[in-house]
Image: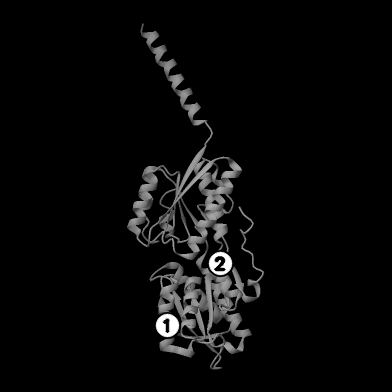
Amino acid sequence: MRKASILAIVVIGIFMLCGCGSVKDQPIKNIKIGISVYDQYDTFVSQMMSAFNAYAMQKQENTGITINVEIYNASGSQSTQNEQVESMIKEGCNVVCVNLVDRTDPTAVIDAAEKNNVPVIFFNRELVEEDLRRWNNLYYVGAEAFESGIMEGELAAEAFHEQEELDKNQDGIFQYVVLEGEVGHQDAIVRTEYSVNTIIQKGVSVEKLGYAIANWNRAQAQTKMNQMLEEYGGQIELVLANNDDMALGAIDALKAQNIPQSEWPAVVGIDGTDVGLEAVRNGEMIGTVYNDKEGQAAAMLELAYTLSTDGAVSSVDKLTGNTIRLPYIKVSAKEAGSFTPPGADGY
């Protein structure tokens, strides 16, 4: 009797194991990717999300797997973003992608994800390296901030060397103001530092007249630029903006004060947004530094898809360790007319 009972238990166990295997081996029909952005009205982030959705649709058509993408706006609140991540995990997202509000405070996001074994892809706003190493299912997709600063500085130096009229007082010095992204934000600090240092390294003497924090925002930049125009007026020969939105805000201020374009300071930005590139083409900006939103969106989609379908992460293009970085591209007025974004042909 006892042997018969043991045999029955063994047989039941075998059937249970076979049953589990058959469920696991069933093909994946759909995946769910949750995304939280720090501010949906940020032009660069908005355009990157549009590219991500487009690539997700292409991937869905190519694979036959339904890809559900849900995008949340944290509206500049880290606590709101933490709640959104918790919600996305509860709703069954296979992967969570996070554009951090506060790059120094990812703890709640990481803890929630690790507790539920849901991979996290941070993007565009880079967290501290030590935090990225806290768990082996954390990734980052973005670019090197210092590269954009170098290229912005090169654009400014080249313009000063080539356009004598930019040195309004003919003193051989580039008098400049800075529109910075955020207080204490690593990208803002690095972009400003490297751009100024590069101008100097290119043989151009500089004098800083002033700076203002405009939080990556066009309207805030217009207000801040108005204030600096009131204080420095025609002394300003160069506006270094940490992104295109703030560069365009500076241009809005110049237009609002009815200053003829021939008397404008040189304005240079970073990101290469659609509106930023158009401003370079029409001569309102001397240049911008293209931040490859299409490439980043495609890389993030491929990584999220691979993680969601239990694929080999090592096969993901450009992934080094747990990081994917896309290069910046310098776009001056000379190149703007023929410039085509690297990802324009699709994923």
Number of dots carrying numbers: 2
State the image coordinates of residue 178 (x, y, percent, origin top left).
Answer: 46, 79
**Three-letter amino acid code at disc 2?**
Asp
Asked if one can make out residue 243 in the rendered structure from this viewpoint, the answer is: no
Question: Would you call the spot at circle 1 few (<14 residues within 10 Å), some (14-19), or many (20 or more)?
Answer: many
Residue visible at 49% across and 82% down in the picture = 255
Q: CA distance from mark 1 to mark 2?
A: 24 Å
Which label belongs to residue 184? none
Mark 1 or 2 closer to N-term?
Answer: 1
Q: Is residue 248 above or below residue 319?
A: below
Q: Secondary structure at mark 1?
A: helix
In this orientation, which residue lies closer to the viewer: 220 or 204?
220
State the image coordinates of residue 124 (x, y, percent, origin top left).
Answer: 48, 60
What residue is disc 2 on? Answer: 274
User: Does residue 223 appear to the left or right of 274 in the view shown?
Assistant: left
Q: Secondary structure at mark 2?
A: helix
Considering every residue shown, the one lying at the far right of the view is 338
Contact (CB < 8 A) between labels 1 and 2? no
In the rendered image, the quadrant that contains the N terminus is top left
Residue visible at 36% across and 8% down in the picture = 2
What residue is disc 1 on? Answer: 226
State the image coordinates of residue 220 (x, y, percent, origin top left).
Answer: 41, 74
Asked if one can make out residue 50 in the rendered structure from this viewpoint, the answer is: yes
Q: Is residue 52 above or below residue 330?
A: above
User: Does residue 132 appear to the left or right of 314 in the view shown?
Assistant: left
Considering every residue shown, the one lying at the far left of the view is 79
State the image coordinates of residue 9 (x, y, percent, origin top left).
Answer: 40, 15
**Three-letter amino acid code at disc 1?**
Asn
Question: Would you call the spot at circle 2 few (<14 residues within 10 Å), some (14-19), or many (20 or more)?
Answer: few
Q: Is residue 139 above or below residue 8?
A: below
Residue visible at 37% across and 52% down in the picture = 84
In this orientation, which residue lies closer to the viewer: 299 or 333?
333
